[in-house]
Image (cartoon, helix red, strand yellow):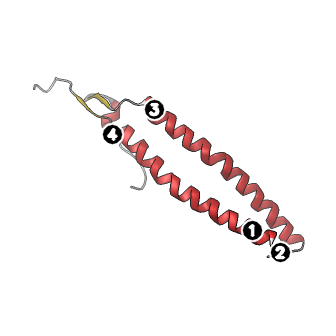
Amino acid sequence: MSDDEVTMVTNTYKNALRSARSACAGPAADLERALSAARVAMDGGAWQGPMGQDFSGELDHHRAALNDAGPAAMATLDAAIAAQPETVPSTAWQVRWQRSGPR
């Protein structure tokens, strides 16, 4: 094989997308469980009065935002994963791509 020869290699970008998707699922579920428990506590009278009402409204707002954003984020990752081939030419950007941020 010469230096100029292009071969098909694993798409490391697609693998990173899969890894990111897996890493997101657990924390999102944990957050929803925590917010659900807070809602149950509030419904049980944990905090009453004007400040409790304000907190309850904010809690519902955050739960709704999470319930909208979570599935949308997963769908975006799923679409990005589906759009990537399993293998790419050794000269493709997906081979040289490096993930930024924590690993």
The residue pinned by badge 4 equals: 12
Kind of residue indicated by mark 3: Ala
User: Please, is residue 29 above or below residue 20 in the view?
Assistant: below
- Which element type, helix, strand or loop, lies under badge 1? helix
- Mark whose residue sits in front, 3 or 4: 3
The residue pinned by badge 1 equals: 40
Q: Position of residue 87 (x, y in %)?
A: 30, 31
The residue pinned by badge 2 equals: 45
The earlier-in-sequence mark between 3 and 2 is 2
Distance between the Cα atoms at labels 4 and 1? 43 Å
Task: Using residue 55 as the reference point, say whether residue 69 is left or right of it.
Answer: left
Identify the residue at horizontal 33%, vertical 39% (top origin): 12
Q: Are marks 3 and 2 in contact (CB under 8 Å)?
A: no
- Mark whose residue sits in front, 4 or 1: 1
* Crowd tier of the residue under label 1, counting other residues whose Cα lies within 10 Å: few below 14, some 14–19, many 20 or above: few
The earlier-in-sequence mark between 1 and 3 is 1
Where is residue 1, by image quadrant?
A: top left
The earlier-in-sequence mark between 4 and 1 is 4
Identify the residue at horizontal 45%, vertical 50% (top origin): 22
